[in-house]
Structure formats: structure tokens, C-alpha cells
Image (tube, grey):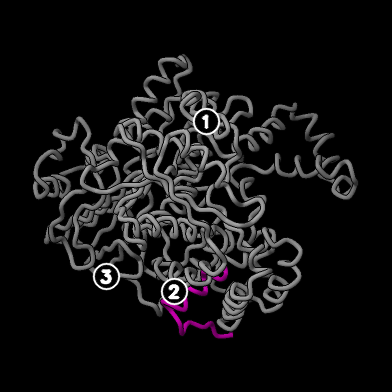
Amino acid sequence: MPVESMQANAEYPTPIRGRPRWAANAAQHGLNAPLPAQAAALLDPALTPAQRRSSLRAIGGSFALALHDGQGRCLLAVDRFAIETLCYRVDGTQLRSADRADALGDVGELDLQAVFDYLYFHCIPSPRTIFQSVYRLPPGHYVWFDRGQLTVEPYWVAEFQPNEDLQFDSARSEFLAHLETAVSRQLDPEIPTACFLSGGTDSSTVAGMVGRVTGRPATTYSIGFDADGYDEMAFARIAAKQFGTDHHEYYVTPDDLVAGIPLVAAHYDQPFGNSSALPAYYCALKARKDGYHRMLAGDGGDELFGGNSRYAKQRVFSWWNHVPAGLRQSLLDPLFLSKFAANTPGLRKAHSYVEQATDPMPQRLQAYNLLLRLGADQVLTPAALAHMDPQAAPRHQQQVWSSVRGASELNTTLAFDWRYTLGESDLPKVREVTRLAGVSVGFPLLDDDLLDFSLRLPDDFKLKGLKLRWFFKEALRGFLPDEILTKKKQGFGLPFGVWTLKHAGLQRLSQDSVRSLVERGIVNPAFADALLGRLLQETPGYYGEMIWILMMLEQWMRAKTPNFKLSA
């Protein structure tokens, strides 16, 4: 059950939000007492930083803490994945906090570096926000503010301890028990609850487990698209049939996008560019109209158990490092990295492979980054770039990558994705669109016990050769339909570029949005012309994504900062 709240401060009236869970050792930290005593324990100035971090690690589940003692001391903290979010700013000797950046920010104080970060990441990674002097707590971090002195640091960092002697049968039994418990923790008999169902491994697992835990079939909601290559409704129907769910479907249309884009963009506290936000919103909205107040989502399974295709791709690149260094450096690298190889049919693929394989992690993960491939100096005006550091985003990534100590490249990539794919993109996407639709959301696959279990799995249980999430799928074989176990990951992917070519309303909205960014002095007019014309026509799926990113930026600015404009 969600924790009850008491008054804490004006912007953030709830000292603890979410569905926190006290660990077995919470008593030694004073965290099994009533809420005021918990606050007193965590705000005790006698605690050392190590003790305070240990106390926070005793809290599980999803949570955001905003504790103030009235004497100039404050403690802010968010859970390991930032399922719950918290922003803050320092005003003199006062720390202000809120669950939204726009509750603390001045619309006249936009941070243009955050605009660059948004175009690079399609979101604005913490701690930066779109507003100057307003910061968001990163996942697993806390703030200690003591009469004007601010400390921000992690209280939890992923520590992988793979058990190489782990046996499949015992691991499977433990995993299934954790899975049932994780789903049970997200259910409340007093709150009508339904499930997102994309037809993928994760959402199908959650929907099936709801039926096993409750003894009643789950209610499921799926989104489809009338566009070749984008619709996965067939797989959702397979899962619904397997588990006998009360299944509901909705096909999103271009008209839905025209109506929903301004609404969804304006709801976020800063620009947010994950294009699957719109279908997730309409899915949640349909559930809410049917009387459901909570939904369960499948996010997290890929990132905990090795299910994203890039994990196998990066393993293929890592094989290059097994070639003797002398042979690579003296012969192979000069040959395959030459202009001759790049321009010779039959050698181009080898050139591309070696070019990426020789790029270190995590830079290699940005090989297809839209902003990098298009060129920031082509996309953005000189006036905008004058306020931006193009190297800040790669430095941010390197810092996150380096924070994971003593782990394999695979596990480091997983932890990297916990920050960027989950904490900064997918979880805010689902959290905010469900909030907009009027429902709460739970993420059973991010349960603390499942997280801890995943930290103990050997690498080849996650990626066996090039087989993605091997253990997860084998453990659920017979429970999940074979068609879902073997399907490729897609989710609620949106055919925006394809539809924009054909739908007049989307054309007007996208063109008007991009050209408004030109008028604001942010986007290069020559690039806008090329993007909306030749590039979209040539590759609508690829360049449509860039139009989406720019459009959502402009729609947010219209709602929050309509008068913003850069001087030449």
C-alpha cells in the first residue's frame, strides 16, 4: 500500500512517496518506527555519511524522500531506479524540493546545455534539468543539506557478484518465487488493476503472473497501429489467449497523435522525446475509462536479464579484441580502417565492423546517435551552439560507465542501461503518461529481490553465446508461448515518420513545430528544410524520429516558455 503522507514543505508536501518497503535490517536504522520517528532517524546530524547511506539502502521498493527538520537540515533521496522522482534547488540557505522541475524553475532561465542533452539523449539525464539551478536526483542518489552545505552522492551502486557455480534448476525455482512475490507486491485488492500487454516477453510474463498470483485472469490492454512492420497485436493476442486474460485493444490513429502530442508534451516537466509515450498514454487512458486505477508494466526485464539486441551486438564487437594486438595494429587496423576499405564493395562491412570495434565503450553505443550522425553544427544554429558543450553528454556517459566497478562489459552495459534506458527514459515515460491518464503504475520486474537475484547471475545466464536473456526465457519455457519466446523485441513502436508522409494534420503539426524552432534561433533553417523535405521522403522511419524529437521540444516550449527566443 502507498505510504500515508504528512506535511514537509510547500513544494513537496509528502515526505515519502511511492511504495517503500523496509528491509529486514531496517530496525537497526530506526526505520520500522512511525513516520515521524523514521524522519528523525534519517535526519540525525550525528550520522556519518556511511551510516546515512546504509540507512537508505535499508529502504526498498519505489520511493522519494523529502525530509526537513525545520532547523536547516534536509534529506532527499530516490529509489535505485528513480521510479519516483525528485527535483531540488538551493536558494541561499534554503533547499527547496518538488517532484517536478517546473515547480522550481523560472521559465526565463532555460539551460541551453539541457537542450543539447535532450537532442543527444532524447531526454535530459539527471542531474541536469531544462531549468538553470534546478536539479533532479539521479537513481540511487541522495541529497544531504545541512544549513547551507549541500552533498549529493549515490547511496547505492550496482555490485555484480556472479555465482559461476549456480545451477539452472535451483536458480529457476528461486527466480519464479521472486517473480510471484514481485507481482504480489504491486497488487492491491482495493485498487482495480490492469496490465499493459505489448506481446513481448516482459509484459506477457507480468500478465501471466497476475493470473497465477490472484487465481483470476488479468485484465490486459494493448495498442496497435495500422502500419506495416509496426503492429504487434498478433503477439498480444497470443499472450492473452495463453493466459485467458480479459483483453482490450485500441488502434492508435494519426488523428490521435495530432490531438495527443500537445497534451503529452505539455504534461512533462521538461522536454521528453520517447516516441512510445503517445501509445502508452492511449493505452492507459483506455484502461482508466474502463474503471482501472492502476496498471502494471513490464519494463526492466531486458535490462536486468540481458534482453536487448545491442548486448549481443557489443559481444560481437568485443571479439575483435581477442585478435592478437600486434596483428591488429600492424596489419588489420590499417587495412580495414583505410579509405580504400570504406569505399570498396565487399570491404565496407569489414570497415564498419572494425571502426566500431576499435571505438571504446561506452562511446561505441552512440554509433547511430541521430545528432552525431547528422552533425550538431548542421542541426543547430551558431547562436545555440555558443551556449552548449557538445562533449558534456559523452562525459556524462563516461562518468556513469566508470561508476560500475569490477564488472564484465556485459554487466557494465546493463547497469549503464539501468541509468539511461530505464531511469532517464522508459520509466519517466510510463510514470508520467499514466499519471496524465489518471492511473498509477507499478513495475514488478524492478523488484529489489529480482534485482539482487540478477546481480548474482553468471554472464552466460544472461547472454549465452549470442542468445539474449537465455535464463529468463528458459525458466519461463512452458509458461510463456513459444511464439513470444522467439519473437524480436519491439514494444509500442510508433510509425510517426511513415504517417507524417501521408497525413495532412501530422504534416502541419511537424512542419509548424520544426519551423518554430528555427524562429526561436535554435535550429538551423537549412537543416529544417532538408529534414522536412528530402530526408523524410528518403527514410521516413529514421528521420521521422528526429522530427519527433524537435516537435516535442517545440510543443513543450509552447506550453511552458512560449516567448523564449535566442538573440542572433
Q: Which residue is mark 2?
A: 110
Residue 189 shows up from this direction:
yes
Q: Which quadrant, please, contains the N terminus?
A: top left
Q: Amino acid at mark 1?
A: Pro
Which residue appears at 49% of the width and 48% of the height? Answer: 421
Q: Which is closer to the viewer, label 1 or label 2? A: 1
- Using the image, tell me which numbered label, if any, was put on residue 376: none
Against 68, residue 157 (above or below) is above
Q: Relative to the observer, which residue lies in front, 269 or 367? A: 269
Q: Amino acid at mark 3?
A: Asp
Q: Magenta span has 423?
A: no
Q: Which residue is mark 3?
A: 91
Magenta highlight range: 549-568
Total numbered labels: 3
Between discs 1 and 3, the one toward the N terminus: 3
Q: Relative to the observer, which residue lies in front, 176 or 204? A: 204
Q: Which quadrant, please, contains the C terminus?
A: bottom right
- Using the image, tell me which numbered label, if any, was put on residue 481: 1
Q: CA distance from mark 1 to mark 2?
A: 49 Å
Q: Amino acid at mark 2?
A: Leu
Q: Which is closer to the viewer, label 2 or label 3? A: 2
Residue 383 shows up from this direction:
no
